[in-house]
Image: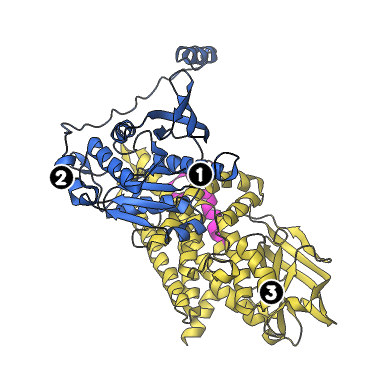
Chain colours: A blue, B yellow
Amino acid sequence: MNIVVCVKHIPDPNLPAEMDGKTLKREGVQGVMDPGDEFGVEAGLQIKERLATGDGESGEGEVTLVSMGPAAAMEAVRRGLSMGADKGVLVSDDVLKGSDALATAKVLSAAIQKNGAFDLVIAGVESTDGYTGTLPGTLAEFLGVPHVSTVKEIVSADGGTLKVNRQTADGYHVVEVGLPAVISVTAGVNEPRYASFKGIMAAKKKPVEQLSLSDLDLSGDDVAVKQEVTELSKAEEREGGEIIEDDGSAAAKIADFLKEAKVI
Amino acid sequence: MPQDIRLLDDEQRALVQMVREFATAEAKPLSIDYEARSEDPKPLYDKLAELGLTGVPFPEERGGGGQPYSTYLLIVEELAAAYLALAIGLSVHTLCAFAINEFGTEDQKKDVLEKLTAGEWFGAYALSEPGSGSDAAALTSKAVRDGDSYRLSGTKVFCTRGDEADVVLVLARTGEAGPKGISSFLVEKGTPGFGGSKKEDKMGWRSSPTWMMSLDDAEVPASRRLADEGNGFKVALASLDSGRLGIAACGIGVAQAAFDEALKFTGEREQFGKPVSANEGVQFMLADMSTAIEAGRRLYRHAAALRDAGLNYSLQAAQAKLFCTDAAMRVTTDAVQLHGGYGYITEYPVERYMREAKALQIVEGTNQIQRYVIGRSLT
């Protein structure tokens, strides 16, 4: 099975965000692979490993990482390769600076198609920097394949069908989807492995194809930014919360509060 | 801010990030309980093996990572910032492996070193004795040749993970008094007559077991003697040069952890209507702390670079050990001070860091011995 995992290089979310006008400053800041994408890479690796050892179809196939970003984004690709992915594709082009989610989906779909036949594309539900959450669905549309969003568990993957549990507000849906397809996975779908020392050293030797926009037969017009950020404002600070003084009834009050919040 | 990784090469940066993730997600949170219970964190050592971190600076043909010592030290520093006792354990393990890699026979490398680099085995080091600490060459443990074996007897003290280790590098006397009568031996766990006789109750590093080891007519095959008879002290000193860099990196790690806590606390804690860190007197303390950490970091990395270039680095290793661990003591003490009363209670981690830093000024040559080494090599 050929699995593609989309990975994004983002400014380290553990450091204070720096702004460049109305967009996030991306150059000259410490970057990391989006932590949400680690779940995607792990999911891809687990499916490949399960097929390699299980009774399903043979373990033929590979996990390819696809990313778009400046040259520094290679770090995110290497990170995924260190975890165990087989190869990478990085699309870098000055024209793509400041791209919106639509343009990104267009570029990634072109890169995925250029990479060859695929059975499954995995992405995180949303990025940890932009948080649009629109990319996986848009990507599926461009690729002309079904999309299953917010996958919280991959139940099985064989015989050209993928069975997953999909997170909903009240529980989960069990979904079977014919491949090829795009899925977006939630944080918590698995426990991403660390890149081991051996993995880090092996990643050096794994192939990464670097592509520009013209390699994908796309022009600047194709990826023109159609989204405009009109205003930025700080998130409201969290309120202080309610303090219950214990006059003997605190436990009951807390229980009522939790009931109201439908926690218990 | 933890160590700045921007100028590292790609592999080093990836390694530090991997260790940082493991340290933050597992080592640091688990350290609290292990320290409270004074329990050796064996599962975390196994995890280090799984991550491939038990043989980083050793040749690939021995199952090691084939990396320069500089790279290994980045890992030690990062671990030390999260869990000093664990970093110390790795440093001692590496010291034992270093001696075998440097002085071992083909069989010793095959049978012992390769198990150490793979993390199947962990190593320890037994030099000090009740009557010989800084004056290590005065040791009195004896090794008497008996056919194809040696019979070892005596008492070793302050042996980190001595009873947990699978193999211990033991220094014992085979000949005349003084350094030239000392030989070194690889003594395996389970050797009859050999084992931990008393676990010390310590001020810090409580989850790093420190053992008094007894050798009671313990039979060790002659094939497990490391280097020629009478060359043991050379093995011991070379291992210590290398080990000192590990301790220096540990010092910077724990100092960094204490500084990060102090910076955070003084920024959040308000007194007289403003953050404590808005006071110039506090800022000056923070400035001195951060400068000492950066200076120490450069110093140990310079010594490591000399080592990696195949140059003599004994002087610089002693300077780095001295400076980095003195800095660690000062920085951790100031971090407690900057926390006020909160620094003195165990709910905050800085009192632990202060207790831990103290041992770094003592182990692998007290800082007075470092000054002696430095003075001797300068004159």
- The residue where tag 3 is placed is B108
Q: Which residues are magenta?
A: B336-359
| Label total for image | 3
Q: CA distance from mark 2 to mark 1?
A: 36 Å
Distance from Cα at disc 2 to Cα at disc 3: 64 Å
For label 3, the SS is: helix
Q: Is residue A159 above or below residue B202?
A: above
Label 2: chain letter: A
Query: From the viewer's perspective, is residue A137 above or below residue B120?
Result: above
Label 1 is placed on what type of residue? Answer: Lys
**Left or right side of B278 for B323:** right
Q: Secondary structure at mark 2?
A: loop
Q: Main secondary structure of the magenta part?
A: helix
Q: Is residue B159 left or right of residue B302?
A: right
Secondary structure type for disc 1: helix
- Where does the image place residue A99, in percent across and percent down from the top left? 21, 41
Q: Is residue A72 visible?
A: yes
Q: What label sits on residue A48 in the rendered view?
A: 1
Residue placed under numbered mark 2 in the picture: A220
Quadrant of the rendered structure where residue B356 is? bottom right
Picture residue at 51% right of the left edge, 76% below the top:
B371
Q: Nearer the viewer, mark 2 or mark 3?
A: 2
Q: Amino acid at mark 3?
A: Gln
Of B379 and B147, nearer the camera is B147
